[in-house]
Amino acid sequence: QDNESKSSKGVLRGFHFQNPPYDQAKLLRCVEGKVLDIALDLRKKSETYGKYHKIILSGENKKQFFVPRGFAHAFLVLSDFAVFSYKVDNVYAPKYDSGVVWNDYDLSIDWGMDESELIISDKDKNLPFLSELNSPF
C-alpha cells in the first residue's frame, strides 16, 4: 500500500505501530521538504530494544528509510511543509493501532525543536510510555 501525507512545520506524528497480525514494515521518504524520522525498536528480545535510530529525510537528499516490523515510527516536519511518502506491507487496521508517547522520558529524544513549536494530536499526546507498553514483538 502506498500512502502520502502533507504536513506543516512542527507537526509531530508518532510513535506509531500496529499490533500483529496487522504489523507493518514501512519504506519511507520525504518527497518535498525535510523531516526528522525515527524508528524505535520494540522487539523484546533484541539487543537494541528501546533504542532508536534518527535520520533526516528530505526532498533534497532523496534518502529512504526502511522501518521493519517490530519497530514504532515517528516523524517531525522541520521545513515549512513536507510531503511524506511511505509504502507499507500490510493494510491499516485501526483496531490494532498502538504506539509510544513521543516525549517518553526514558528515551530522552532530542527532537531539535522547542516543545512550544510542536503540533501533536491528542491521540499522540496520550500514548503510553515504553515502560507501560506490553510489546507484542
Image (tube, rainbow, N blue to C red):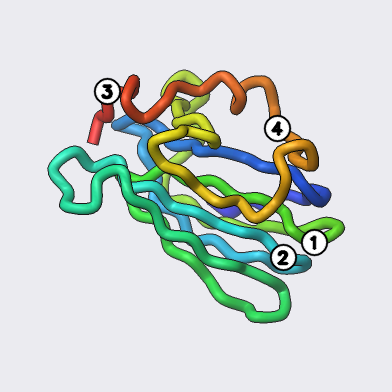
Marks 2 and 3 sit apart, C-alpha to C-alpha, by: 33 Å
Q: Name the residue under label 3.
A: 134
Percent across and percent down for residue 10 are 76, 46
Marks 4 and 1 sit apart, C-alpha to C-alpha, by: 16 Å
Nearer the N terminus, badge 2 or badge 4? 2
Q: What residue type is labelled 1?
A: Ser
Task: Tell which of 4 and 103 is nearer to you.
Answer: 103
Nearer the N terminus, badge 3 or badge 4? 4
Q: Is residue 126 left or right of residue 6?
A: left
Question: Residue at left 78%, top 37%?
Answer: 116
Marks 2 and 4 sit apart, C-alpha to C-alpha, by: 17 Å
Numbered marks: total = 4
Q: Name the residue under label 4.
A: 120
Q: In this view, does 70 lie to the left or right of 72?
A: left
- Residue 79, which numbered label? 1
Nearer the N terminus, badge 2 or badge 1? 2
Nearer the N terminus, badge 4 or badge 1? 1
Task: Tell which of 20 and 98 is nearer to you.
Answer: 98
Residue at the bottom extreme, as displayed = 61
Q: What residue type is labelled 3?
A: Asn
